[in-house]
Image (cartoon, rainbow, N blue to C red):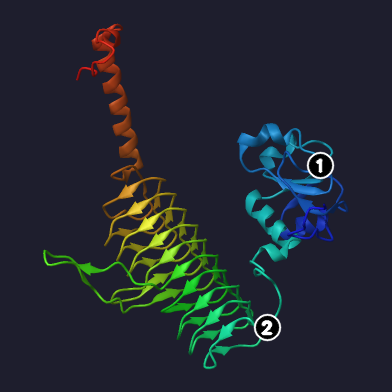
Amino acid sequence: MAEPEFFPAPAGLSVSDITAHVGGRLTRGDAGRLVRGVAPLDGAGPSDITFIDNPKYLNLLAETRAAAVICAAKFAARVPDACAVIEAAAPYRAFASVVGLLYPGALRPPGIVGGHGISSAAHVDPSARLEPGVVVEAGAVIGPLAEIGSGTVVAATAVIGSHVRIGRDGYIGSGSTVQHALIGDRVIIHPGVRIGQDGFGFAMGPQGHQKVPQVGRVVVQDDVEIGANTTIDRGANRDTVIGQGTKIDNQVQIGHNVVVGRHCVIVAHAGVSGSTVLEDYVVLAGKVGLSGHLRIGRGAQVAGGSNVADDVPAGERWVGTPAKPIRQWMGEMRALTMLGRDRRAKAGPDAATERGPDEEPKA
């Protein structure tokens, strides 16, 4: 049985066309050679284009059979003679641009079942307003007075709540729910995302935990992408905001009243507690946890697995639990390593064998 083609093979582009598209410089090879696919260094064949940006993979570069390689000038001499060389200042970004040119359908999910218009198996409330060109797949539900802009795809079984507004050329993934929210243009929401449900708000006390009504909204600005199974709670008494161009990975939790600035990156399993503010260009790596009511300054970065309990100044890099500036953390780790080495040296080489097999190590 033939393998399915999820992304049909492109017609192809010449090396010269690709060079012009990425604003690069062809320093070696046949400008008219045709490129019909993309592949990693070790999997590329004579009609594929590939790239190198990380010197860790120079050994794979030496063996590649690609038609063309996008690379920085410093790696150009390492490219095999049979490959065309396209020099670019940012090879990875250039390669990403070429992939989008060859496979434009991969830039935005195409929907689960495909098709055009509103499926007869969808439920769209008569009071909802959908602009021409909206696609609503089978099983999707669109509530009263919802508004959706042209070019947006609402995939199978997605649910859009009443009064929700969604901009143009977006994508609402299968099985996702959007309520109490305003969504901008070109927003991609992957399957299973939950937007606009109650924030976790309770007035705790010895008589029990009284629920605090959550009467805010979620505002997602233009060009945001939200990964599968991420949850974004609506505000308690103000809006939860996701700023323009921000990219959120799978399985991220964002609490009520959180404000995320423009062009932030939040990686999988990160959790942002309520009323925390991330300024523009913040990066949270995987499994980062932020306490509530913090401010993470513009351009700050937090390393994976860190837990942050204090404000992070702009531009700083923090790591650890509790998180702290990376230079301070590295100094403390060096001190602990030296302390352990000194204790072992004082104990002598036989210290580990002086206790019985069932004894605990001596303090």
68 relative to 95 in the view: left or right: right
Locate residue 73: give its quadrant.
top right
Q: Position of residue 276 (x, y in %)?
A: 31, 63
Nearer to us in this view, 73 or 283? 283
Q: Residue furthest left?
A: 206
Q: Which mark is residue 83?
A: 1
> What residue type is disc 1 on?
Cys
Nearer the viewer's eye, disc 2 or disc 1? 2
Location of residue 311 in the rendering, given as x and y in whole percent from the top left corner: 28, 55
- Residue at 72 percent of width and 53 percent of height: 24
Q: Position of residue 32 (x, y in %)?
A: 88, 53
Residue corresponding to mark 2: 117
**Are the residues at dot 2 and dot 1 in contact (C-beta closer than 8 Å)?**
no
Label 1 packing within 10 angstroms: few (<14), some (14-19), many (20+): some
Which badge, 2 or 1, is on the more N-terminal residue?
1
Q: CA distance from mark 2 to mark 1?
A: 45 Å
Q: Nearer the viewer, residue 295 or 288?
A: 288
Instruction: Give the percent coordinates (x, y) of residue 213.
Output: 27, 77
